[in-house]
Amino acid sequence: MSDMHMGQPQSAGNEGGGIKIPILFGAVIALLASNVWLFLQLDKLRGEMDKVNMATEEKLSDVRQTATATTQTSRRNLEAMQEQLETARRQAAMAVGQAKVEADTKVAAMAARLEAEQKKVKEQLSTEITQKVGEASAVAESKVNEVKTEVSAVKTDVSATKSELEKTIANLTKVTGDLGVQSGYIATNGSEIAALRKLGERNYYEFNLGKTKTATRVGDIMVLLKRTDPKKNRYTIEVTVDDQHVEKKDKTVNEPVQFLTSKARQPYELVVNQIKKDVIVGYLATPKVMEPRK
């Protein structure tokens, strides 16, 4: 029995070893087949890579040829452009030079014309100035002659006026006034008053006074006409001087009516040349130099 138990396990081991060998053999065959297939695939891939490389090389060759042609064309175009640029530069330089020559010519011509115009204007101005100076001299000489004539006429008029004034003054008289003081020259009309005014010895204020209720200013005094008597050539007035009222009664034509003021040592003189109904016409004479009374 023990021999039987020991023999059974060995038979089982042999059966297991017999199964492994075919499996290993099959695995080896499968591995060889796989390697063969991989080799074939690798060879196929190498062939395709060669084709790709050849195609790529052809493309690169075409690109190189195209690039070479393009480069040559670009170079030729660049050279043509450079030549055109150089030609344009030369033409521009020639044009600038020609323009400069033309400009210089034009400037020279304009300068010549300007100089000729200036010379012409100077000559014209010189002629006009000479003519104007001559005309001005003639006018000035004429004006001088006119002025001389006018001066002579004025001198004659002045001499005549002076003579007439002296004659008028010679016909005037001096009389004693109502205050007992000898008066200045007595004027009887407007021309004689004008002659006295030209002498410049006294101030003269002419008046034409009517009969009113209030006094009228004549010079620096107030005069009120109270009544007139044309038939007898008499009148009565009231004079206000230094805030004092002085009545002058029954005075006659061309009589110097005198009154004193605090402003002057010499008396004021009032002279009436005409007496009408309620109207008197005459003048007031006051000292030229006022010296207050002490």
Image: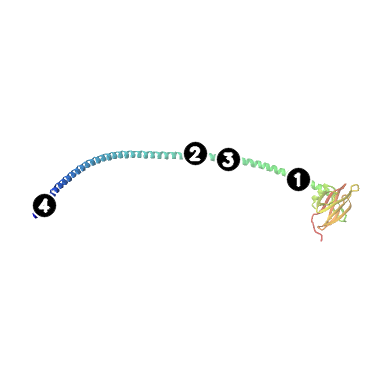
Q: Foreground: 234 or 119?
A: 234
Q: Which residue lies most toward the right here? A: 232
The residue identified by callout 1 is 154
Q: Residue at x 72, y 43 (%)?
A: 146
Q: Which residue is mark 3?
A: 121
Per the image, label 4 sits on a secondary structure element best described as helix
Whichever of labels 3 and 4 marks the residue nearer the N terminus, that label is 4
**Is residue 267 among what the camera can see?**
no
Kind of residue sitting beneath label 1 = Val
Q: Earlier in the sequence, mark 4 or mark 2?
A: 4
Q: Residue at x 46, y 39 (%)?
A: 99
Residue bearing the label numbered 2: 106
- Relative placement, left or right, of 82 versus 179 is left
Which of pointers 1 and 4 lies earlier in the amino acid sequence?
4
The Cα atoms of the two marked residues, 3 and 2, are separated by 22 Å
N-term mark: 1 or 3: 3
Q: Residues within 10 Å of mark 4 (few under 14, many from 20)?
A: few
**Mark pair 3, 4: CA separation:** 157 Å
The single residue placed furthest to the front in the displayed view is 1
Tag 2: amino acid: Lys
Q: Position of residue 221 (x, y in %)?
A: 82, 54
What element does badge 2 sit on? helix
| Disc 4 residue type (three-letter) | Gln
